[in-house]
Image (tube, rainbow, N blue to C red):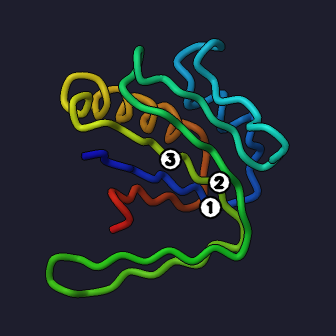
Amino acid sequence: MAVEFRLTLAGDLSLDDVAGLVGADVTERPRPSGTRPRLFSARLYGTRGFALTVPSGSQGYFDAEADDGTRWEWEPETYVDIDFFMKAGDLVDKGIPNMMKAVAQVLTAPQEDVALVQNGN
């Protein structure tokens, strides 16, 4: 079983800047992925317990449902996602602790609105 977390940052942000915030050092920073200039990625399973993708987009739509059935919806004009993919065996020891450090680092930079979503909900 795998677990995915998505941190969405609203605004017209540079992928280079966001990638610089999420990597612990220059060797861990996500890099452009192939021919897609709006997608960065890094496989850090061995050191951090997760893989990252960092895409940007526009006209976003995100929603989630709370335990009590209420819905949350958000439609940022432009945004950058930081997607963390973790294998079940890495969640407790490496994945979640290192993800929380990366999220805390990203949140030190000024942002408009931010959402952290687990497994799409």
Taking the image as shown, residue 91 lies to the left or right of residue 29, namely: left
Amino acid bearing label 2: Val
The amino acid type of the residue labelled 3 equals Asp
Residue depicted at x 39% and y 50%: 5
Whole-angstrom CA distance, mark 2 to mark 3, is 10 Å
Question: Please, which residue is most extreme toward the bottom here?
Answer: 70
Q: Name the residue under label 2.
A: 80
Q: Which mark is residue 10?
A: 1
Tag 3 residue: 83
Quadrant location, the C terminus? bottom left
Quadrant hosting residue 29:
top right
| Type of the residue with mark 1 | Ala
Observer-side mark, 1 or 3, equals 3
Residue 68: x and y in percent read 15, 83
Question: Where is 33 relative to 28, above or below?
Answer: below
Q: Which of marks 2 and 3 is in front?
A: 3
Label 2, label 1: how many angstroms apart (C-alpha)? 7 Å
Point out residue 80 in the picture as x, y percentages from the top left corner: 65, 54
Q: Are marks 2 and 1 in contact (CB under 8 Å)?
A: no
Which residue is at 45% across, 31% downward? 102
The label on residue 111 is none
Cβ–Cβ below 8 Å for labels 2 and 3?
Answer: no
Q: Quadrant of residue 47?
A: top left
Q: What secondary structure is marked by label 3?
A: strand
SS for tag 2?
Answer: strand
Sequence order check, earlier mark of 1 and 3: 1
Horizontal side, residue 91 vs residue 24: left or right? left
38 in relation to 92, above or below: below
User: Which residue is rendered at x = 23% and y = 37% of the image?
Assistant: 88
What residue is shown at x 42% (from left), y 24% (from top)? 45
CB contact under 8 Å: marks 1 and 3: no
